[in-house]
Amino acid sequence: MRMIETWRWFGPHDPVSLWDIRQAGATGIVSALHEVPIGEVWPMDKLIERKRMIEWDGSLVRPRETGLEWLVAESVPVHESIKLGTDDRDLYIENYQSTLRNLHAVGLKTVVYNFMPVVDWTRTNLTMELEDKSIALSFDMEELIVFDLCILQRKEAEKDYTPELLEKALARYKKMDEAQRQTLTNTIIAGLPGSQEGYSLEAFKEKLAQYKGVTSEKYFDNLNYFLQKVIPVAEKYGIRMAIHPDDPPRSFFGLPRIASTLTDFTNILKAVDSPSNGLTLCTGSLGACSKNNLVEFVEKLGSRIHFLHLRSIQRLNGGSFFETGHLKGDVDMYAVIKAIHQEQKKRLAMHRQDCHIPMRADHGHAILDDQKKKTNPGYSAIGLLKGMAELRGLELGIIKNCQVN
């Protein structure tokens, strides 16, 4: 019962080619139409062309299949009007429904989205050098406070942090030169791969202001409204919606976060109790919080896990962390994959069509020649190849061990 190995591809301008991905051993592609503005319908002609590009090699006299299949749409972004619950949200929900119908028409059955307000996944350093000289992504709480308190100058920001962290952050800010401050600002608000949206500092402040008075309860109501409208359409067309966890799984900038814990996801799945209403289990995002038991996630919500992001992190003091090797750090990847295989066996016994859960190695390090190339942060070819190979070997060992026992 092997998981389906997939790889995220950012389209024709991705430095990692489709043949690179095929050579790495993946058979499934995870992609999106990043060029379509958020909130607009993904048009059929663009979807057909993307599918053809992924699955057929047209460079030959006789085109042939690449051996790849577009399996997951990641992400179909949710417009900010839906998240805010403004009067025009129904228009954007209707567009979202149309996109789901079009995805069904070209054979896509798994759709990833997130409900993080204003900012998508957030890091403070994209070039952290590890002991072996590989380059990793990191989230440093002191650097976040530097941005929030000293650069963004958000009102009442100091109330969100401990006196000890505030003191350390202010001391760090004084040591930073203007170039370092600008790099930190760009890293947080300029947009990371897959986010599809970046801001100037002033635009970022305006976005935050729109959320004044939006409590976690109100924000959950807005998600629930979206799900009530969208999940019936997804269910009709056999599409599995897979909400991605908050990354990191905590609130900052005074924004509500509602997809960070087991309780959060239990409430989301209960809001619209449908097989089409599921989640992406991102072990790195959820693993950044020590209170999250990833095996418990699988055991309790396994039937609704539609996609897997497998990576590990090393937690540090004060909520900081960095992305370590896929089999290192604080995520017990052995236990997680073993639990996933138990879930797949349950699905097989129930004759479910989605017995094999698609997974991808998430956020590899920049290593070897990739350090000399232009790559998307976290998505260098060789680093992800290493991660995929490690996960593949671990999975095979688990399968063989289960067969013996």
Image: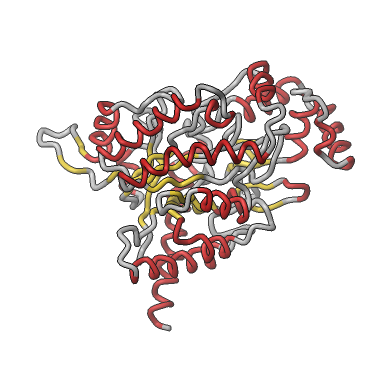
Residue 312, horizontal then vertical, whole percent: 58, 54
Query: Horizontally, is 4 left or right of 163 in the view?
Result: left
Residue 184, horizontal then vertical, whole percent: 68, 28
| Residue 257 position (above or below residue 212) | below
Q: Residue at x 65, y 23 (%)?
A: 210
| Residue 260 position (above or below residue 82) | below
Q: Residue at x 84, y 33 (%)?
A: 158
Q: Total number of numbered labels? A: 0
Q: Nearer the viewer, residue 210 or 89?
A: 89
Report the coloring of the rendering: secondary structure
Which quadrant is home to the C terminus?
Answer: bottom left
Q: Nearer the viewer, residue 212 or 166?
A: 212
Q: Residue furthest bottom?
A: 405
Q: Residue at x 56, y 24 (%)?
A: 86
Q: Nearer the viewer, residue 133 or 223?
A: 223
The part of the image, by quadrant, that contains residue 10 is top left
Q: Residue furthest top?
A: 202
| Residue 130 position (above or below residue 96) | below
Residue 29, horizontal then vertical, whole percent: 34, 44
Residue 20, horizontal then vertical, whole percent: 34, 42
Which quadrant is home to the N terminus?
Answer: bottom left
Q: Residue at x 32, y 62 (%)?
A: 352
